[in-house]
Image: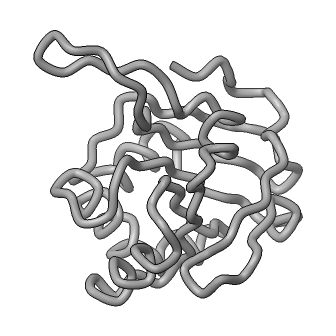
Amino acid sequence: MTALKAGDKAPDFSGINQDGKEIRLSDFAGKKLILYFYPKDNTPGCTAESCNLNDNYSQWLERGFEVVGVSPDSAESHQKFRDKYNLKFDLIADTEKEILQAYGAWGEKSMYGKKYMGVLRTTFVIDENSIIQEVFEKVKTKDHTDQILKSINL
């Protein structure tokens, strides 16, 4: 569970995208950003979430938003995932989990009574000044765009 909340300054980050290019929070200065953290490429929930955001990508751009996904998968995995689903936005390979930890999206999970460390599916809506406007910890993967739009009154 993230300790970050609406009104907090978004932690600065730097990571490598699917093309091996460095992506930083500062690249989005003056733009709004949907920054979403997801567990794994090509899994049902992650695919549904990514495709939902992608299917509405032009709508995000019209509203002044950029979209970036982050997971611990490799840049190569991201490239294949992006190509397979024709995703139009960057995916950051956070193999060292530094961005995940900075945003509180890495933590203890539980399945079948077993505890383990993993990605806590979380989305941050960040404004033009790098201030967090909204945090989603209960993501509706198949309907994430509407979930975000309703919450931020767009």
Q: Residue furthest left?
A: 112
Establish if 95 lies above or below 2: below
Q: Residue furthest top?
A: 113
Residue at 76% across, 75% down: 22
Establish if 131 lies above or below 68: above
Q: How is the image coloured?
A: one colour
Question: Between residues 56 and 40, which one lies in front from this camera angle?
Answer: 40
Residue at 44% across, 29% down: 137
Rendering coords of residue 2 (x, y %):
58, 22
Q: Quadrant of residue 64?
A: bottom right
Residue at 35% across, 89% down: 83
Q: Quadrant of residue 9?
A: top right
Establish if 50 lies above or below 75: above
Rendering coords of residue 118 (x, y %):
41, 33
Q: How many marks?
A: 0
Q: Quadrant of residue 80?
A: bottom left
Rendering coords of residue 28 (x, y %):
80, 66
Give the left or right position of residue 3, taking residue 14 as reference: left
Question: Between residues 130 and 11, which one lies in front from this camera angle?
Answer: 11
Residue at 30% across, 15% down: 115
Give the left or right position of residue 7, taking residue 85 as reference: right
Establish if 12 lies above or below 32: above
